[in-house]
Amino acid sequence: MLRWLLAIAYAYAGYRHLATPAPFLAITPPWVPFPAEVVAFTGVAELAGAAGLLVPQTRKAAGWGLALYALCVWPANFHHALADIAIGGETLSWWYHGPRLALQPVIIWWALWAGGVTDWPFRRR
C-alpha cells in the first residue's frame, strides 16, 4: 500500500514536471545549468522511478534512484524557502516550507523502504 502511494505521488510529480514546468523552473537554484532540461529530466526520472517501484525486478534500483533523486532536489526546496519565491503570484509560508524541508529525509527513507533496500525500522516477514 505504501509503495503504491509513493509510486502514485512520484508519477503525479513527474507528470507535473513535464506538463507544467514553470513552477519547478522558478524554484531551481540559479547555479543549476540548463534548468529547463534538468526539470524535464527530473520529470522523466520521477516517472521511471514510480514505474520501477511497481516491478519487482527493478524495485531496488528504483528505490535507490528515487532516494538519490530526493536528496538531489533538496537544494531546490531550500532555495524555494530561503529566497521566498512566489509561484503563481503567491509565496508560501514557513508552515509549508518548514515541514517540507524537515520531511525530506523521511521521503528519502520511504523510497529506500518501498524499494526493498531497507526494512528499518520495520521487519519484513
Image: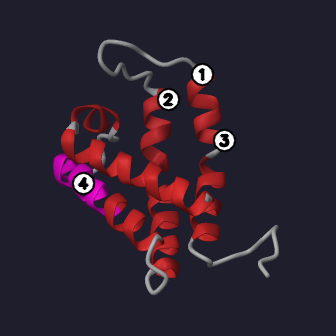
Task: Kindly identify which residue carries mark 2.
Answer: 81
Q: Amino acid at mark 2?
A: Ala
Type of amino acid at the residue the image marks with label 3: Ala
Find out whether the residues at labels 4 and 3 contact each other: C-beta distance under 8 Å.
no
Q: Which mark is residue 51?
A: none
Q: For residue 38, which numbered disc appears in the image?
A: 4
Q: Main secondary structure of the magenta part?
A: helix
Proximity of marks 2 and 4: CB atoms separated by less than 8 Å: no
Which amino acid, by three-letter code, is at mark 1?
Answer: Trp
The earlier-in-sequence mark between 2 and 3 is 2
Residue positioned 62% across, 78% down in the render: 117
Q: Residues within 10 Å of mark 2 (few under 14, many from 20)?
A: many
Q: Residue furthest top?
A: 89
Query: Cβ–Cβ below 8 Å for labels 2 and 3?
Result: no
Mark 1 / mark 4, whichever is N-terminal: 4
Q: Is residue 31 magenta?
A: no
Residue 55: x %, y % from top left: 44, 78
Residues tagged 1 and 2 counted as in contact (Cβ below 8 A): yes
Residue 41 on the magenta span: yes
Q: Is residue 80 above or below residue 58?
A: above
Q: Which residues are magenta?
A: 33-45
Cα distance in 3D space between marks 1 and 3: 11 Å
Is residue 87 rendered to the left or right of residue 78?
left
Residue underneath mark 3? 102
What is the secondary structure assignment of the residue under circle 2?
helix
- Asked which secondary structure carries label 4, the reply is helix
Q: Nearer the viewer, residue 96 or 52?
A: 52
Residue marked by disc 1: 94
Q: Earlier in the sequence, mark 1 or mark 3?
A: 1
* Rendering quarter of residue 95: top right
Pinpoint residue 1: horizontal percent, then vertical percent. Answer: 61, 59
**How is the protein colored in the picture?**
secondary structure
